[in-house]
Amino acid sequence: MTKLIGYARVSTRQQSTDRQQVDLLAAGVRRDDLYIDHGVSGARSSRPQFDRALDALEEGDTLVITTLDRLGRSTQNMLAFADTLRTRGAGLRVLNLGGGDVDTSTPMGSMVFTVMAALAQMEHEIKRERVTDSIRKRREAGLNLGGRPRRITDSQIRSAVRLVEGGVPAAQVARDLGMSRATFYRRSRDLKL
């Protein structure tokens, strides 16, 4: 008896797979046949739940994912995966491609999969390029890049530097401020610039 094996993944623990799970269950995947990786990058070759999903696949079964980028980031890895499915006699169903099975054992299905994998990789690279460009522009404009707000003010750092200049060990001053010695040195150096 053939079955649908569902796989969902998010790259960070703060993200949710709720939408993916709803879509996979609506596509006919049973909850017992749903495998979910939380906080696992698509760039990693080892994904614990993904590996379990593959182990659960038997000949005639179909792996169901919501989007192609859940499989991985590079076209090369996705093509190797398609070959693995083909040798196992399993199918692949990608919901955002209209929900139809992509039969990677046929020349047409293989071509569609190859094109979609290349497009997914290109989309990822464009997104990364945009983020890098945005960070560079914000840095050049002197704008805040986000991150944790500073708890220790510049005035407190200046006072701490005076203590160190007066003979108090830097390690003790940094500990009293609640920061590492390296952070204290970096912050005091930044103030002198």
Image (cartoon, rainbow, N blue to C red):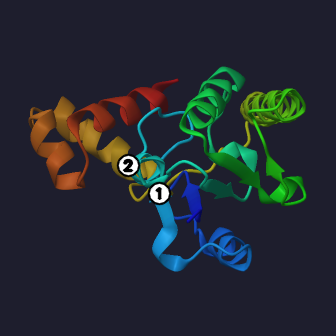
Q: Which residue is pictured at 52% across the width and 43% down the height?
A: 41
Q: Amino acid at mark 2?
A: Pro
Tell me if 189 is positioned left or right of 21 in this view. left
Q: Amino acid at mark 1?
A: Asp
Q: Which mark is residue 14?
A: none
Q: Residue placed farthest to the front in the image?
A: 1
Q: Which mark is residue 48?
A: 2
In the structure shown, which secondary structural element does the residue marked by tag 2 occupy? helix
Tell me if 136 is positioned left or right of 157 in this view. right
Kindly identify which residue carries mark 1: 37
The answer to whether residue 144 is seen in the rendering is no
Q: Quadrant of residue 28?
A: bottom right
Of residues 106 and 187, which is closer to you in this image? 106
Q: Which residue is pictured at 61% across the width and 52% down the height?
A: 60
Q: Are marks 1 and 2 in contact (CB under 8 Å)?
A: yes
Image location (x, y in percent) of residue 72: 62, 37
